[in-house]
Amino acid sequence: MMPTYIWHAHVDAGAPDSVHCILLDELGDTIADGTREFAQALFDALGVDARAERWEIKPYRSSYFSDFLDSDDWRDVWQVVWSAHLTADRAVELEDTGEPIVETEAEDDSWTDQKRVRDDARLPCLVIADFDDEEERARARSRVEGRALQAARGEAGAPPPAFHEAEVADGVRQLQVDLGPFDSAFYAEGSGYAVRVREACERAGGTVNYQDRFA
């Protein structure tokens, strides 16, 4: 049984019955649509005393969790991760243990080989940045939305970015930026637009890889 790792779990602002988290697995390829049992196992691992009612699990590529940012293989840099929204039958609370990650043996029985995320899959890009305070996070969001990145966004054929803000372990202010879907060629050829977004977050005071904040 391979472990599933739950990262940055938090209760969604304005939705006290919903938990958002990022999922990784040991093999990088055993999560699909999710099941009620899988969602419940994630709740149980997080200490949530509630029943899982609904769940949405979506694959992305992100460099935030990569241990190989200097690799020549784009798949090592832009790893597959899953964004999960889990809705309970009541309002929930999460204890801030100061740890950004929870290990669980939850298994997604909806996964089949046909649902494997293949290298040539068109996947959205998720840039994640961590900040010490709200001012830094707001500055990063403004820069990502700003005119300086509009040309790069247009060249990449990307939609306007979508933002998700959260307070995660130890009060870190996190900004998750969904840049929209890209073919594998975007990642293989340097992912220029995503790199510029990542750099904009760094210039605003953020860290863009887990090792810089939580290792």
Image (cartoon, rainbow, N blue to C red):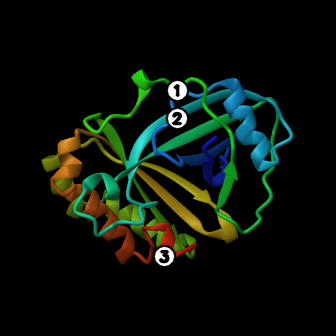
Q: Residues within 10 Å of mark 1 (few under 14, many from 20)?
A: some
What separation in Å lies between label 1 and label 3 (alpha carbons)? 32 Å
Task: State yes or no: discs 2 and 3 in contact (Cβ < 8 Å).
Answer: no
Look at discs 2 and 3 and give the one toward the viewer: 2
Q: Which mark is residue 111?
A: 1
Task: Give me the residue at 63% from left, 30% from top.
Answer: 55
Q: Quadrant of the N terminus?
A: top right
> What amino acid type is highlighted by mark number 1?
Trp
Of the pair 6 and 135, the residue shown nearer to us: 6
Residue for badge 3: 212
Residue for badge 2: 31
**Residue 214: image x %, image y %?**
58, 72
**Residue 69: image x %, image y %?**
33, 67
**Residue 215: image x %, image y %?**
56, 74
Q: Residues within 10 Å of mark 3 (few under 14, many from 20)?
A: few
Q: Secondary structure at mark 3?
A: helix
Q: Is residue 15 visible?
A: no
Task: State yes or no: discs 1 and 3 in contact (Cβ < 8 Å).
Answer: no
Task: Give me the residue at 54% from left, 62% from top.
Answer: 174
> What amino acid type is highlighted by mark number 2?
Ile
> What amino acid type is highlighted by mark number 3?
Asp
Task: Give me the residue at 68% from left, 55% from top.
Answer: 102
Splitting the image into 4 quarters, where does residue 37 fall?
Answer: top right
Residue positioned most to the front: 1
Task: State yes or no: discs 2 and 1 in contact (Cβ < 8 Å).
Answer: yes
Please determine whether, in this image, residue 110 is positioned above or below residue 174.
above
Please determine whether, in this image, residue 29 is positioned above or below residue 163.
above
